[in-house]
Amino acid sequence: MLEAIRQAVIEGDADLTVQLVEEALEAGMDPQTITDDGLTSGLRTVGELFDRGEYFVPEMLISADAMEQAMVIIKPLLAVGGFGGAGTVVMGTIKGDLHDIGKNLVVTLLEGAGFNVIDLGVDVPIEKYIAAIEEHDADVVGIGALLTTVLPAMERAVTEIKAHDPDVKVMVGGAAVTAETGDRFGADGYASNAKQAADLALQLMAG
Ligand code: B1M
């Protein structure tokens, strides 16, 4: 079933992807497993096909759309839990990067963990993060990046946010980021997937 979902994403067949996800949920499969090992795994293969020059941007967009249509069904099942109990998180993909599927998943799981999430979207300049921290008295900032070319911008953002407000916790993630990158940038934490991001935000709040 998971392989069939992977293949439907790779083929960019949104209708089939949605149908298979509905069948998997009816069969009792865990929504997180469907997301990580079916949908996200399929998009990772799409990235490899792009890398090999077999797929191009339009194919990536079509496959991304198949995942996003399936996520409409899954998201409400992931975001179970209270809202706003745990604190405020400002979330966004860094300036220069337009990838948001993973970021949106992180937002869903943060809300499911009880956080009030201010989602700044994609291509977020540093000053927008800082203005949002001020406006919403944020406890945690989440910065995502999927392109290696935007890592210098992410490093500058971590430095400037920490200089502006040493008390706010900064966590980083996204396919272009590793735990080592996070350490080197001076971030308070790194998360490799959406569930880890929610758990990390709770840990950072607990100090
Ligand atoms: Co592009 N893209 N893309 N892309 N794309 C990648 C990232 C790439 C790795 C493909 C490849 O394998 N070569 C490659 C980057 C290479 C590199 O720099 N390392 C790449 C490229 C090159 C590009 C373009 C430059 C292509 C071009 O135009 N020439 C271009 C750049 C546009 C831009 O950003 N300025 C581009 C464009 C696109 C689309 C817009 C077509 C589309 C994005 C659609 C959208 O987001 N709305 C797209 C897609 C879909 C991909 C791949 C195939 C899939 C990404 C995805 O959404 N995965 C991707 C291949 C890959 O990732 N291997 C690729 C599903 C998602 C759930 O996983 O984002 O990893 P992910 O999120 C995970 C974790 O990372 C983590 O939790 C999530 C859930 O578990 N996480 C966080 C994510 N964000 C976090 C933030 C946190 C914490 C955890 O904060 C604390």
Image (cartoon, grey):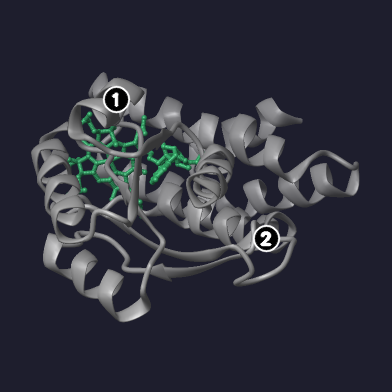
Position of 123 with respect to 75 (left or right) is left
Residue 54 bears which disc, if any?
1
Q: For ligand 1, which image quadrant applies?
A: top left
Position of 178 with respect to 20 (left or right) is left
Q: As rendered, which of 20 and 84 lies closer to the eye?
A: 84
Position of 102 with respect to 59 (left or right) is right
**Dot 1, crowdedness within 10 Å: few (<14), some or many (≥20)?**
few
Q: As rendered, which of 172 and 67 lies closer to the eye?
A: 172
The residue sitting at the right extreme is 27
Check the picture and name the quadrant holding the N terminus: top right
Position of 50 with respect to 31 (left or right) is left
> Disc 2 marks which amino acid?
Ala
Tag 2 residue: 79
Q: CA distance from mark 1 to mark 2?
A: 35 Å
Coordinates of residue 118 in the picture (x, y in percent): 41, 71
SS of the residue at dot 2? loop
Q: As rendered, which of 188 and 45 lies closer to the eye?
A: 188
Q: Between disc 1 and disc 2, whose residue precedes?
A: 1
Q: Residue at x 36, y 77 (%)?
A: 136
Coordinates of residue 72 in the picture (x, y in percent): 62, 63
